[in-house]
């Protein structure tokens, strides 16, 4: 995607139909991070087209976008199964939904298909958010109950931290156990961090005491 970024205007949009055509070809082979970058660039380009809707070149860009809407839908469908485990997939799906909602297809033959897909994606995203809200407080309580939080006194206040079981390294250092638990929970949701396996827990300490 380096060629796409180089071809962009300084304001972050693709300035011509020919450059957009090349960018779409590159986007079809893009890795995940490049998909996100291209989607942002495409959104800026389409927003710019709205401001220059009478310009023939920008009208041609809209036609190209219509022809490649299936590419965006494909990305969203690939990410949909991972909405509940990876925030990056959530961000990509939300961005695709935003693009297609603000720049719907002009061809009637694809409008109904896109509308149905958008409804499905939005419903899946809502379900993920509701599960996260319902289950997040339970898991936060579980972290507070089972993770061993250690306290370190400083000149002005106490600091709480949790450590890795393998090497004793610190994962969080906050002014309260709650803040530390929230940091662990956030990491668990964003990158699949398994705190149950990797952190020192209260029953680990109980096992150590029993052996001594």
Image (cartoon, rainbow, N blue to C red):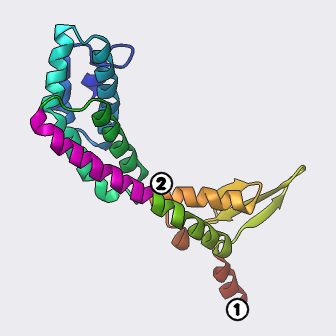
Please identify the quarter of the rendering in which residue 16 is found: top left
Q: Residue at x 35, y 36 (%)?
A: 98
Earlier sequence position, callout 1 versus callout 2? 2
Mark 2 lies on residue: 190
Question: Can you say whether 114 is above or below 14 in the image?
Answer: below
**Element marked by disc 1:** helix
* Residue 42 coordinates in the image, percent (x, y): 29, 27
Q: Residue at x 38, y 13 (%)?
A: 10
* Residue 212 coordinates in the image, percent (x, y): 73, 90
Mark 1 lies on residue: 210
Please identify the quarter of the rendering in which residue 144 is found: bottom right
Quadrant placement of the N terminus: top left
* Residue 74 coordinates in the image, percent (x, y): 20, 46
Question: Can you say whether 173 is above or below 22 in the image?
Answer: below
What main secondary structure does the magenta stretch of the protein show? helix
Q: Name the one closer to the observer, 164 or 7.
A: 7
- Taking the view exactly as shown, the residue that stands out farthest to the left is 109
- Taking the view exactly as shown, the residue that stands out farthest to the right is 155
Q: Name the one closer to the observer, 16 or 150.
A: 16
| Residue 121 among magenta residues | yes
Q: Residue at x 36, y 49 (%)?
A: 89
Range shown magenta: 108-129
Q: Name the one closer to the observer, 91 or 23.
A: 91
Question: Can you say whether 131 is above or below 21 in the image?
Answer: below
Mark 2 burial class by Cα count in 10 Å: few <14, some 14-19, many 20+: few
* Residue 6 coordinates in the image, percent (x, y): 30, 19
Single out the mark in the foreground, 1 or 2. Answer: 2
């Amino acid at each position: 995607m380096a060629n796409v970024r180089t071809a962009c205007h300084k304001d972050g949009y693709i300035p011509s139909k020919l450059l957009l055509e090349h960018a779409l070809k590159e986007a079809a082979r893009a890795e995940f991070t490049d998909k996100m970058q291209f989607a942002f660039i495409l959104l800026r380009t389409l927003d710019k087209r709205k401001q220059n809707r009478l310009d023939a070149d920008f009208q041609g860009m809209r036609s190209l976008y219509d022809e490649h809407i299936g590419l965006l839908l494909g990305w969203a469908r690939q990410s949909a199964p991972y909405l509940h485990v990876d925030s990056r997939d959530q961000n990509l799906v939300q961005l695709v939904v935003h693009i297609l909602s603000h720049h719907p297809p002009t061809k009637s033959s694809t409008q109904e298909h896109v509308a149905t897909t958008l409804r499905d994606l939005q419903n899946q995203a809502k379900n993920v958010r509701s599960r996260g809200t319902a289950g997040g407080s339970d898991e936060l309580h579980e972290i507070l109950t089972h993770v061993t939080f250690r306290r370190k006194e400083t000149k002005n206040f106490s600091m709480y931290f949790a450590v890795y079981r393998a090497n004793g390294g610190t994962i969080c250092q906050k002014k309260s156990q709650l803040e530390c638990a929230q940091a662990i929970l956030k990491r668990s949701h964003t990158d699949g961090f398994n705190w149950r396996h990797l952190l020192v827990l209260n029953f680990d300490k109980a096992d150590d005491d029993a052996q001594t």
